[in-house]
Image: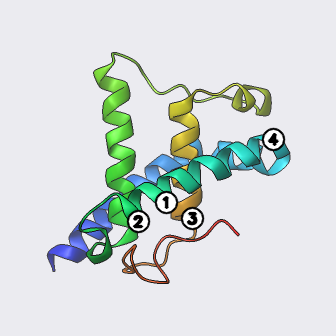
């Protein structure tokens, strides 16, 4: 029961993040260099969550992604900043590290299968 609640809560956070930053995925689809940046960030996030989290194999991918995203958002706030969301493709090309990292989280979350742990073959999606 608790695992389902955690996963629902994680999915809500990821959905809100996508609502806020999903335009970055659209921009990345239109700008090849930006797509490469998103892919690199996504690969780094996937590596962190598959190799760098001790209990990652037992936790749903959405929960790990949401936790990671919340950590990035908390870091931005702790530094006294706000997440800057570009309004057009040119703005996304110049977007800061935090925004691009969270767009990568959105890219990974888009392809997650509910309930699958990161350590399984069906956990975090590959970028291929």
Q: Earlier in the sequence, mark 2 or mark 3?
A: 2
Residue at 69% in and 29% down: 87
Task: Name the mark nearer the viewer: 4 or 3.
Answer: 4
51, 95: nearer the viewer: 51
Task: Name the mark nearer the viewer: 2 or 3.
Answer: 2
Proximity of marks 2 and 3: CB atoms separated by less than 8 Å: no
Residue at 36% in and 77% down: 117
In x, y percent, where is residue 77?
A: 33, 25
Residue 75 lies left or right of residue 110; in this view the side is left
Count every numbered label the image shows and give the total: 4
Q: Quadrant of residue 96?
A: top right
Proximity of marks 1 and 4: CB atoms separated by less than 8 Å: no
Secondary structure of the residue carrying numbered label 1: helix
The residue singled out by tag 4 in the image is 33
**Residue at the farthest front position:** 51
The C terminus - image quarter? bottom right
Residue at 66% in and 52% down: 39
Cα–Cα span, label 4 and label 2: 26 Å
In x, y percent, where is residue 108?
A: 55, 61
Q: Is residue 31 visible?
A: no
Cα–Cα span, label 1 and label 3: 13 Å
The N terminus - image quarter? bottom left
Give the numbered dot on residue 50: 2
Residue 15 lies left or right of residue 79; in this view the side is right
40, 13: nearer the viewer: 40
Proximity of marks 4 and 2: CB atoms separated by less than 8 Å: no
Cα–Cα span, label 1 and label 4: 20 Å
Q: Earlier in the sequence, mark 4 or mark 3?
A: 4
The residue singled out by tag 1 in the image is 46
- Label 2: few (<14), some (14–19) or many (≥20) C-alpha neighbours in 10 Å: many
């Amino acid at each position: 029961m608790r695992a389902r609640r955690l996963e629902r809560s994680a999915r809500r956070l990821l959905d809100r993040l996508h609502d806020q930053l999903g335009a970055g995925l659209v921009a990345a689809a239109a700008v090849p260099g930006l797509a490469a940046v998103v892919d690199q960030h996504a690969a780094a996030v996937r590596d962190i969550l598959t190799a760098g989290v001790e209990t990652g194999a037992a936790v749903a991918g959405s929960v790990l992604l949401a936790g990671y995203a919340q950590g990035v958002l908390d870091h931005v706030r702790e530094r006294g900043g706000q997440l800057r969301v570009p309004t057009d493709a040119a703005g996304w090309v110049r977007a800061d590290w935090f925004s691009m990292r969270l767009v990568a989280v959105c890219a990974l979350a888009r392809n997650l299968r509910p309930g699958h742990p990161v350590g399984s073959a069906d956990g975090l999606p590959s970028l291929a």
